[in-house]
Amino acid sequence: MKKIVVLFVVLLFTGFLVAQDVTYKKLPSVNVKTLEGESFNTSDIYNDGKPILISFWALWCKPCKKEMEAYNENYFDWVDETGVKIYAVSIDDARSTSKVAPFVNGKAWEMEVLLDPNGDFKRAMNVNMIPHTFLLDGEGKIVYQHTSYYEGLEEEIYELVEKVAAGESISSN
């Protein structure tokens, strides 16, 4: 009986790890909005063969705002060195969406900000917890993803971005 329980736990854990290693051939096609209120289809996210970071966040999420601030502080250097493009996808609902643009403008974020008030893109990407960041390679394939934020994580993410920009393979965590 003990062997069966251990085997079950191992299989369950292995299944969890495999479930976290999701890669897509391309991003799902979902309509979201820009800060200017224009419609934008997520299948149009493209960066001319260079890496892309897509980070889901919300105004009410303190770790999300810390992560986005860390990305913004490094954004110009990262773009110069790797060509990376960052998309910050707000999942704030319709009641608080109007507060996103003033917040972003007040912080002078340079990255592209998209609004997903209905959570359609979030659901299509299987995002259950934020902050949740995806790293895409030059072909638009998801090569890495993570949830949560801690100080210094942006340096780890940047190392992965450098590898992807150089065409190196990275293992998904």
Image (cartoon, grey):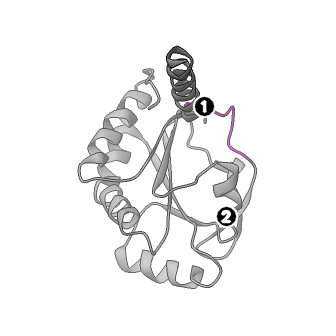
Magenta part of the protein: which range?
A: 21-28
Toward the viewer: 6 or 154?
A: 6
Magenta-span inclusion, residue 66: no
Quarter of the figure with residue 104:
bottom left
Q: Reading the chain from its start, which is encountered first: label 1 or label 2?
A: 2
- Which residue is at a point 45% across and 57% down the rendered structure image? 131
* Front: mark 1 or 2: 2
Mark 2: which amino acid?
Gly
Residue 101 position (above or below residue 23): below
- Which residue is at a point 59% across and 27% down the rendered structure image? 15
Dots 1 and 2: beta carbons under 8 Å? no
- Which residue is at a point 49% across and 20% down the rendered structure image? 6
Q: Secondary structure at mark 1?
A: loop
Q: Main secondary structure of the magenta part?
A: loop
Toward the viewer: 93 or 88?
A: 93
Mark 1: which amino acid?
Glu
Residue tagged 1: 139
Which residue, as the protein is rendered here, is positioned at the far front? 1
- Which residue is at a point 55% across and 30% down the rendered structure image? 21
Residue 119 is tagged as: 2
Which residue, as the protein is rendered here, is positioned at the far top? 3
Toward the viewer: 87 or 82?
A: 87
Expressed as whole percent of the image width and height from the top left, the position of residue 161 reads: 39, 36
Residue 156 position (above or below residue 42): above
Distance from the alpha carbon under mark 1 to that under mark 2: 25 Å
